[in-house]
Image (cartoon, grey):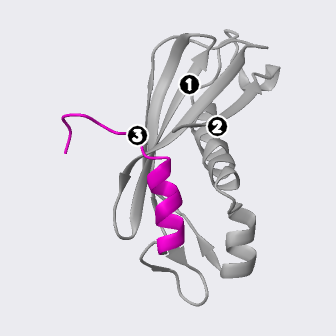
Amino acid sequence: MAVDYSFKVRFGDTDAAGIVFFPNFYRWMDEATHEFFTELGHPTSELLSIEKVSTPLLDSKCEFKTPLFFEDEVIVKTEVIELHNRVFKLSHTFYRGETLIAAGYTLHAWTSFKEKPKALAIPEHIREKLTVHQKILSGSN
């Protein structure tokens, strides 16, 4: 089950050719991750301020299929594609209408910031919610 994050491309997101400048896709994957946790009922701002937990980025990748332009309406569909003891990977798929624009992932560690940063096991109540949003990958490891 995917969580959708939608937005409109702003003029400042584009380069001199009028095409979205590629680093913005990484920014939008980050925004989609925050939206994902809000939809789970655990906004990242509360995780950090109350529980002193965050999900720092370990790795990311994005493949671009077709360009985006100023004022394009975009939907990013975010799903869990890997769930381990301390880390999880989210897929982020970008669409303009039915057109696939880009697809990427972000890999995160469940990390305590109470003292020195330390990766922790993902709590069971969070793991259950992540599992509900996990994409079933047939034929993959």
Counting residues from the start of the chain, the first of labels 3 and 1 encountered is: 1
* Label 3 neighbour load within 10 Å: few <14, some 14-19, many 20+: some
Instruction: Say the numbered circle drawn on residue 7.
Output: none
What SS does tag 2 mark? Answer: helix
x%, y% of residue 52?
65, 80
Q: Is residue 116 left or right of residue 49?
A: left
Name which residue type carries label 2. Answer: Trp
x%, y% of residue 73?
73, 17
Q: Residue at x 47, y 73 (%)?
A: 124
Counting residues from the start of the chain, the first of labels 2 and 3 encountered is: 2
x%, y% of residue 89?
41, 51
* 135 drawn magenta: yes
Which stretch appears magenta? 124-141
Q: Residue at x 68, y 21 (%)?
A: 74
Instruction: Say the numbered circle drawn on residue 28.
Output: 2
Residue denoted by label 3: 135
* 13 drawn magenta: no
Q: For the C terminus, which image quadrant?
A: top left
Which one is in front in this view, the residue at disc 1 or the one at disc 2? Answer: 1
